[in-house]
Every structure is written in C-alpha cells, then in structure tokens.
Image (cartoon, rainbow, N blue to C red):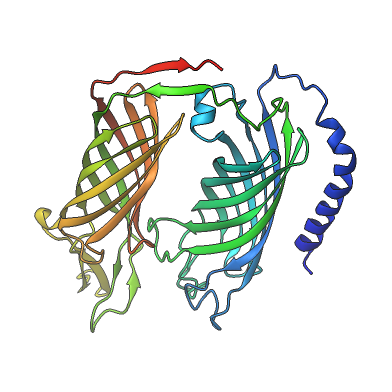
C-alpha cells in the first residue's frame, strides 16, 4: 500500500467520524454576504498509458502518484447563468506528479486554471460533475541527444498540462464536500520542441473540498430564473494566428532520423460564420489559410570552404508550396466568461506532407473587450499528434440579436 492509498483511507475514516456531528451543522444559518470560495485537496494514484516503449518496455501500464491543491469561486445559484450553465465554478490550482523516474522524466509540477460544473444531481446530497484543467507544467527532464536520448515523449522542460475529470460529489455539510471520480491528464509542448509524443495518464482520485463562505444551499437551485431569449442570427469570427513549430526530417540514405532544433514560423488566417440559436452553442463552417515555413523543407549536407567541415543546411520550399487551405466544421460552447471550441477539417490545398490532410483544432476563447477576443489552442492530426500550439487575436462581427431577461413567477 502506498502512502497515497494510506492517506486516502485515513481521510475517509476522518470524514466518516466527522459526519456524525456534521449533520448538525447543516441546520445552522449561514451568512451569505461574502463571495463563496473553496479550497480542495486532491490525491491520485493511477497509470501512465504505454504509448511508447520508453514508457513501458513490457507493454504494461506503469503507475504514478500525484496531488493537487485548488482554490476558486463557487456559484451562488442566484443568477440565471448559474442555473443555465450547471452551477459553474472557477479557480486555480497547483499540481505535483511523481512518475518514479526522476532520472529520465523528472518530477514535474503544474500551475493551472480550472473550471467545472454540474451534470446532474440525484438526491439532495449527491451529484455528478465535471471539471477540466489547463495550465503549464515545469521541472521535466527532456530529451537530450547525449544525456537522455531515449526520452522521445518529452522534448522540453516546460509543457502544457491538460486534464479532464468526471466525479461524484457528496455534500457532507455546508462546509465540506467529498469528490470521488476519474481523471485523464495529458502533458506535451504541442510540437514547439521535438520529440513530443507526450505523456498520458488515467487515474481514479479522491478530493476533499472545504467551502469558504458557503451559499445557504446548492440543491435544489432556483429554477425560476430564465436565461436570455436569443434571436437566431450569424456571428462572423475573423482571426489571425502567429506561432512556430519544429520539424522532423527522415532521409533515405545519407541522413539518419533527426530532430531539427530549430523553430519555423507559422502564420494563419481564419474566417468562421457561426450560427447562433441560443446563448449556449454556436456552430458553422470555417476557412483556414496557413503559411507553414517548415512545409517542404529539405536537408542538405555541404562543406564549409573555410573550415573544410561538413555542415547541414536547410533548404526551404517556394512560397506557394508553404500554403495550406483547409475547410472545417466548428462548434463552440459558450460559458459566462469564455468559450470552448473544437474543429474537424480537411486541407483542400495541402502543403506540409509530414502532417495528415485531415486535421483537428481545439482551444479556449476569451473576449478581451467587446467583440475582440484572444484564443489559445492546438492544431493536431490523428486526434493525438500535435502539429503546433498557437495564439491568435480576432474580432466577432455580430449579427442582429434580441437579448431579454425575465423572471418567471413562482
């Protein structure tokens, strides 16, 4: 039994003992003049998916342990957004993982943003919930051709941390909740530095949540608040992307398999007319035009006339051979403070032959001022292989709409 299992059992024992008198607290009047906040402690023990021989030479799933602390803001249930979006909560967290291989993987820790909410509740004290995390992880021991050549899963010391969770929430009393569920976590740098197979983990977890300044009750919420009425219309998103990526070259005879330690520029433009039918969802076609400096590159071995030594020179393709034009279907889920989106597309004009013609894009969209937004996302193929991470800036040209808010009588 690991120390994490023992600690989990000890916490469950304390909770069971604590619950004897905790029910009395449920009837105590709670002041609700402050913002509801929460503090959560998470314990996890799970497996690393053996996607590469480096992870597990035997093909078995190696184990890992992790812990996290989260701090955030809970909903009050007094606004229409709380009911319409499933009592969404937001916060930040600190994560630490131990893969039991500090010598070639490292001991990473992460700082992340989190958001979650309600899927459905069964009884007054039980509910099914979701949560996702997005952040940055540090302290990896990446690939090095001399000191760490077998590590082809992590190519940089800093990587992106993405996680999704599904869990049951047990409301012990107004101040304490117990969460039990499962999580999937992914670490990679989005091909900003190669190699980059990434690390994927899957695990059950236990969380103890302390509610600071809790709302009087979370269930049942006020179902009398109605969301705004939306007149169907089109929104037109225009955005510009600037990013970079590294390239992998495999030559037949003269050159061995190699990763070029060089960043190539990527620029893009997209236009998306999105159908808006309600406050929650948008969808529509999207046109992507991408200039990829790494498309069509070749590697040449030449002699330096001054030193008579061999060196490698990158030969670039002509400008038209660096352009790709793709058409995709885009779906967007709107939240009170941001949006999540995903796209599935195909390159009609396909420049970079090292990428697949079919591509996927996913990311988060945040409106900065009025209709001006910023996006952070990833473009990939085969639903797993990253092409590059990107940031972009854009503008939404809104169609005519009619927003109203009403309160139904009880």
Residue 205: x and y in percent read: 67, 56
Residue 87: x and y in percent read: 56, 33
341 up-or-down from 218: above or below:
below
The one of 149 and 84 positioned closer to us in this rendering: 84
Position of 278 compared to 150: left or right? left
Name the quarter where the C terminus is drawn: top right
Position of 64 compared to 402: left or right? right
Residue at 40%, 22% in the rendered image: 228
Q: Is residue 141 visible?
A: no
Q: How many marks?
A: 0
Residue 390: x and y in percent read: 34, 46
Residue 294 appears in which quarter of the rendering? bottom left
Q: Is residue 43 visible?
A: yes
399 up-or-down from 260: above or below:
above
Residue 28 appears in which quarter of the rendering? top right
The one of 209 and 372 positioned closer to us in this rendering: 209
Name the quarter where the N terminus is drawn: bottom right
The one of 92 and 87 positioned closer to us in this rendering: 87
Position of 321 compared to 116: left or right? left
Residue at 78%, 36% in the rendered image: 173
Residue at 62%, 31% in the rendered image: 74
The one of 54 and 202 positioned closer to us in this rendering: 202
Position of 297 compared to 181: left or right? left
Residue 120: x and y in percent read: 57, 43
Residue 96 appears in which quarter of the rendering? bottom right
174 up-or-down from 328: above or below:
above
Residue at 56%, 83% in the rendered image: 58
């Amino acid at each position: 039994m690991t120390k994490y299992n023992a600690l989990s059992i000890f916490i469950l024992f304390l909770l069971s003992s604590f619950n004897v008198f905790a029910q009395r607290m449920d009837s105590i009047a709670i002041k609700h003049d402050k913002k509801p906040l929460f503090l959560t402690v998470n314990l996890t023990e799970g497996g690393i998916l053996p996607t590469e021989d480096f992870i597990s030479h035997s093909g078995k799933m190696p184990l890992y342990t992790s812990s996290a602390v989260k701090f955030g803001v809970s909903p009050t249930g007094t606004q229409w957004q709380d009911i319409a979006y499933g009592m969404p909560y937001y916060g930040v967290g600190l994560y630490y993982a131990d893969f039991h291989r500090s010598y070639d993987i490292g001991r990473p820790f992460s700082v992340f943003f989190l958001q979650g909410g309600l899927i459905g509740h069964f009884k007054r004290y039980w509910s099914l919930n979701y949560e996702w995390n997005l952040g940055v992880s540090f302290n990896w021991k990446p690939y090095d051709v001399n000191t760490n050549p077998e590590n082809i899963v992590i190519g940089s010391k800093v990587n992106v941390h993405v996680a999704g969770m599904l869990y049951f929430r047990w409301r012990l009393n107004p101040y304490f909740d117990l969460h039990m569920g499962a999580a999937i976590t992914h670490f990679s740098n989005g091909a900003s530095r190669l190699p980059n197979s990434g690390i994927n983990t899957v695990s059950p977890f236990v969380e103890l949540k302390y509610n600071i300044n809790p709302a009087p009750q979370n269930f049942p919420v006020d179902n009398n608040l109605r969301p705004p009425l939306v007149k169907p219309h089109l929104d037109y998103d225009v955005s510009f992307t600037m990013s970079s990526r590294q390239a992998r070259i495999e030559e037949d005879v003269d050159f061995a398999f190699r990763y070029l330690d060089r960043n190539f520029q990527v620029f893009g433009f997209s236009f998306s007319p999105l159908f808006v039918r309600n406050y929650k969802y948008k969808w529509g076609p999207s046109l992507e035009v991408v200039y990829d400096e790494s498309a069509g590159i070749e590697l040449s071995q030449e002699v330096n006339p001054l030193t008579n030594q061999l060196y490698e020179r990158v030969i670039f393709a002509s400008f038209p051979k660096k352009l790709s034009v793709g058409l995709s279907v885009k779906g967007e889920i709107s939240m009170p403070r941001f949006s999540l989106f995903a796209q599935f597309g195909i390159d009609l004009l396909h420049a970079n032959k090292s990428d697949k013609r079919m591509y996927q894009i996913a990311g988060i969209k945040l409106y900065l001022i009025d209709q001006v937004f910023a996006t952070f996302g990833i473009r990939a193929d085969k639903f797993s292989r990253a092409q590059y991470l990107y940031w972009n800036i854009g503008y939404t040209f809104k169609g005519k709409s009619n927003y109203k808010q009403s309160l139904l009588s009880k």
